[in-house]
């Protein structure tokens, strides 16, 4: 292994809107935390909002190192590490929960200190520094091993041939996999994904298809739906992705969604801008009796846009889902390693890489180039 330097380069966020590239002490492993050499860190489309604390949820205990999910290599082990070895390729996920109170103390590493005083103090005292750096100290629970030979090896040697930055697509998939598992989606079932052409919602279409479900992708843009459908390869015998262009006419949209046959489940990935729209109502009305709904988006409706009687009379299950469970990450990685979940060039994905010193350009590019399969990353 490369010797670990005493200093590292990192983005240092001093206060909202005041960030700089700085030389900071390299952290040391401790019980429950190992040191990761960052190979590539995902720059989300909302990173500019996190850096500027444009919403109270993005306020952090400054100064901090921002940056959420990343791919890296284990650089130094903690005293209680049992499975990892130095040099292992790993995925870092950003959903950190307190070990003694995982239900109430939850934070998004490098982005969100949670909503309770306990969660804010938990982040401040333990995990204030994220992944926009050459090294990061990561909770053991949030470090997930990757089969490097399988994922990045040559196809001639049974590898899938992905580049390290292309593996960041797993980040978009982990959250939606949690939502799909939360409603117990089964192979052969039919699910509506709405909306379906964003970074997360498009990933929901790809993941549900990889899980063996029959997917109806519903959104407003015919051209974006066509691009999404073309990006998800279908093997012989598999039903292709079905698409519905939503017209914001509940009766017509419901009929269009029902046209493919009985619908077992719905996952809604609406952004805040979709607050008040009717597409989720149409999707719920299209469900068969005993259908299930996963609500994962960021809508701000004060009441659900479908009737109590609809849910009651049809024995529907409505489930809110925030993030995922730890086991979901392992299962999602296995889905990718099996080859069922397609990534990289084969799936039409685009990855734009920036060096650490060009972090401002990376943040700007990510904000302007969001969408399914479009990823921006910083390579320290």
Image: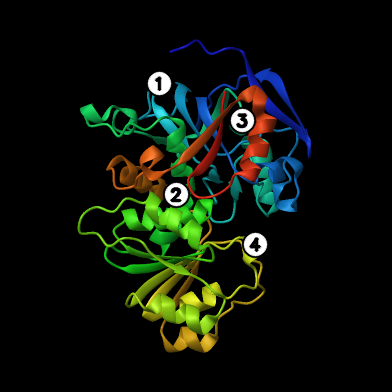
Q: CA distance from mark 2 to mark 1?
A: 25 Å
Q: What mark, if any, has residue 87 been given in the picture?
A: 1
Quarter of the figure with residue 273:
bottom right
Q: Which residue is mark 2?
A: 173
Q: Do the numbered discs 4 and 2 sit on residues whose CB atoms are within 8 Å?
A: no
Q: What mark, if any, has residue 367 been given in the picture?
A: none
- Residue 278 in sight from this viewpoint: yes
Disc 2: CA contacts within 10 A as few (<14), some (14-19) or many (>=20): many
Q: Pick whichever of labels 4 and 3 is earlier in the sequence.
A: 3
339 or 89, nearer to the observer:
339
Q: Which residue is mark 4?
A: 272
Is 119 situated left or right of 373 in this image?
right
Identity of the residue drawn at 69% across and 46% down = 120
Q: Pick whichever of labels 1 and 3 is earlier in the sequence.
A: 1
Q: Secondary structure at mark 4?
A: helix
- Residue 111 in sight from this viewpoint: no
Locate the N terminus by quadrant.
top left
Q: Secondary structure at mark 2?
A: helix
Q: CA distance from mark 1 to mark 3?
A: 19 Å
Q: Give coordinates of residue 310: x percent, y percent.
A: 48, 86
Disc 4: CA contacts within 10 A as few (<14), some (14-19) or many (>=20): few
Above or below, 288 against 144 in this view is: below
Is 265 situated left or right of 323 in this image?
left
């Amino acid at each position: 292994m490369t010797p670990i330097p005493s200093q590292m380069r990192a983005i240092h966020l001093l206060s909202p809107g005041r960030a700089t590239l700085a030389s900071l002490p390299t952290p040391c492993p401790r019980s429950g935390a190992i040191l990761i050499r960052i190979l590539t860190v995902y720059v989300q489309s909302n990173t500019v909002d996190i850096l500027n604390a444009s919403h109270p949820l993005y306020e952090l205990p400054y100064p901090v190192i921002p940056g959420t999910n990343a791919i890296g290599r284990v650089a130094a082990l903690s005293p209680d590490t049992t499975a990892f070895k130095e040099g292992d390729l790993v995925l870092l996920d950003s959903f950190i929960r307190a070990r003694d109170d995982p239900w109430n103390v939850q934070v998004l590493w490098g982005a969100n200190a949670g909503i309770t005083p306990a969660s804010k103090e938990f982040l401040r005292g333990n995990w204030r520094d994220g992944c926009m750096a050459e090294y990061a100290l990561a909770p053991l629970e949030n470090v997930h091993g990757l089969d490097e030979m399988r994922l990045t090896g040559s196809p001639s040697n049974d590898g899938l041939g992905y580049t390290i930055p292309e593996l960041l697509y797993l980040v978009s998939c982990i959250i939606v996999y949690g939502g799909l598992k939360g409603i117990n989606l089964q192979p052969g079932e039919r699910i509506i994904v709405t909306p379906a052409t964003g970074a997360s919602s498009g990933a929901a279409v790809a993941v549900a298809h990889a899980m063996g479900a029959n997917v109806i992708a519903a959104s407003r843009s015919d051209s974006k739906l066509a691009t999404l459908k073309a990006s998800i390869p279908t093997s012989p015998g598999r039903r292709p992705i079905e698409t519905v262009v939503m017209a914001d006419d509940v009766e017509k949209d419901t009929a269009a969604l029902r046209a493919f046959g009985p619908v077992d489940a719905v996952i809604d990935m609406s952004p805040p801008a979709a607050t008040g729209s009717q597409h989720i109502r149409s999707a719920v009305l299209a469900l068969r009796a005993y259908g299930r709904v996963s609500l994962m988006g960021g809508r701000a409706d004060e009441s659900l846009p479908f009737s109590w009687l609809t849910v009651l009379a049809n024995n529907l299950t409505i489930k809110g889902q925030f993030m995922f469970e730890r086991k979901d990450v392992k299962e999602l990685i296995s889905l990718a390693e099996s080859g069922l979940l397609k990534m990289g060039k084969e799936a039409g994905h685009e990855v734009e890489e920036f060096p650490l010193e060009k972090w401002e350009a990376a943040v700007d590019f990510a904000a302007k180039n969001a969408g399914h399969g479009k990823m921006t990353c910083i390579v320290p």
